[in-house]
Image (spheres, rainbow, N blue to C red):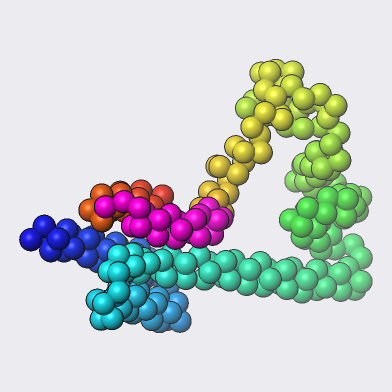
């Protein structure tokens, strides 16, 4: 009796998790118009794969708790799709920038006094973090026409160039410009080497951290779950499994 009860509880929990995954990855993104037809087809296919993984142990009299791996395909596919889309967008952005750069250079060749062309090229190089080239084109534009907005771009680029060359660094706490040869802010006392990198990773690259953690911890999770059901009583292992699944969903599926 109790075995049937806990089995039903376990199966219901896994189905609920699959339902939550399907909602986040397909339904919610479809409502927000953030899902292509191809992506929807891939997700539905792997949802069927997940269901197959879930029912496989029942069909062939295997350890039914192996069905826990049915929750893995959808998050893994989402991670892969997001990575591919991100790479594709960056590649297309580089192609577009290259075309724009060629067009503006051609404009300068035909119209050497075209200020907008020089500024536009400077903006492209600035976006690429090629501050030396950006500064050169901004200064050439400034010589043709002395405009306040161009002067502002020159000041910003000069500052970014100093930061890049480690002549100065900007305190993330008070925004004060400090000389590059000191490690403690002259205003607020912030030390740039104490948790600066980790703060940037935590607050500016949250999605990247989640993806990396998933890739790194997934194999360990598989080993852990296998060991869990080998060493512990099935019902205790079930409770721990449901708790871990809940915490995992809270972390990886929260946008």
Q: Is residue 234 left or right of residue 75?
A: left
Residue 45 seen: yes
Near-viewer residue (16 or 225): 225
| In the image: residue 222, left or right of residue 22 | right
Q: Is 208 left, or right, of 253 in this rendering?
A: right
* Residue at image point 72% right, 22% down: 185
Q: Which residues are magenta?
A: 212-233
Q: Is residue 207 visible?
A: no
Picture quarter containing residue 175?
A: top right
248 with respect to 143 (left or right): left
Is 181 a magenta residue? Answer: no
Residue 174 position, x and y percent, is 64, 25
Quarter occupied by the N terminus: bottom left
Residue in the picture at 35% in, 57% down: 230
Against 92, residue 13 (above or below) is above
> Is 244 placed above or below 162 here?
below
Q: Quadrant of residue 148?
A: top right
Q: Nearer the viewer, residue 137 or 210?
A: 210
Give coordinates of residue 201: x percent, y percent: 60, 44
Q: Position of residue 205 (x, y in %)?
A: 58, 49
Q: Is residue 148 above or below residue 175?
A: below
Please give the name of the residue rendered at 47% of the width and 71% of the height, measured from the top-left corner.
77
Q: Residue furthest front?
A: 231
Question: What residue is drawn where x is 41% and y is 69%?
Answer: 74
Q: Main secondary structure of the magenta part?
A: helix
Residue closest to the far left? 1
Badge count: 0
Query: Residue 88 at what x, y percent from top left?
Result: 62, 72
């Amino acid at each position: 009796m109790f075995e049937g009860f806990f089995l039903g509880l376990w199966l219901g929990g896994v189905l609920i998790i699959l339902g939550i995954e399907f909602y986040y990855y397909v339904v919610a993104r479809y409502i927000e118009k953030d899902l292509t037809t191809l992506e929807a087809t891939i997700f539905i296919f792997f949802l069927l794969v997940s269901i197959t993984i879930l029912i496989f142990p029942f069909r062939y009299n295997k350890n039914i708790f192996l069905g826990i791996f049915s929750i893995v395909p959808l998050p893994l596919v989402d991670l892969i799709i997001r990575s591919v889309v991100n790479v594709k967008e960056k590649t297309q952005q580089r192609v577009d920038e290259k075309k724009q750069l060629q067009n503006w250079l051609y404009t300068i060749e035909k119209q050497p006094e075209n200020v907008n062309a020089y500024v536009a090229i400077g903006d492209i190089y600035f976006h690429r973090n090629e501050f030396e080239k950006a500064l050169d084109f901004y200064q050439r534009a400034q010589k043709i026409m002395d405009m306040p907005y161009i002067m502002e771009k020159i000041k910003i680029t000069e500052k970014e160039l100093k930061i890049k060359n480690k002549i100065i660094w900007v305190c993330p706490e008070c925004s004060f410009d400090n000389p590059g040869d000191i490690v403690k802010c002259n205003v607020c006392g912030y030390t740039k080497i104490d948790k600066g990198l980790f703060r940037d990773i935590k607050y500016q690259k949250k999605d990247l951290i989640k993806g990396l953690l998933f890739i790194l911890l997934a194999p360990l999770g598989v080993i852990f779950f296998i060991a869990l059901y080998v060493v512990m009583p099935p019902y205790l292992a079930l409770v721990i499994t449901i708790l871990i699944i809940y915490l995992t969903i809270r972390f990886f599926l929260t946008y």
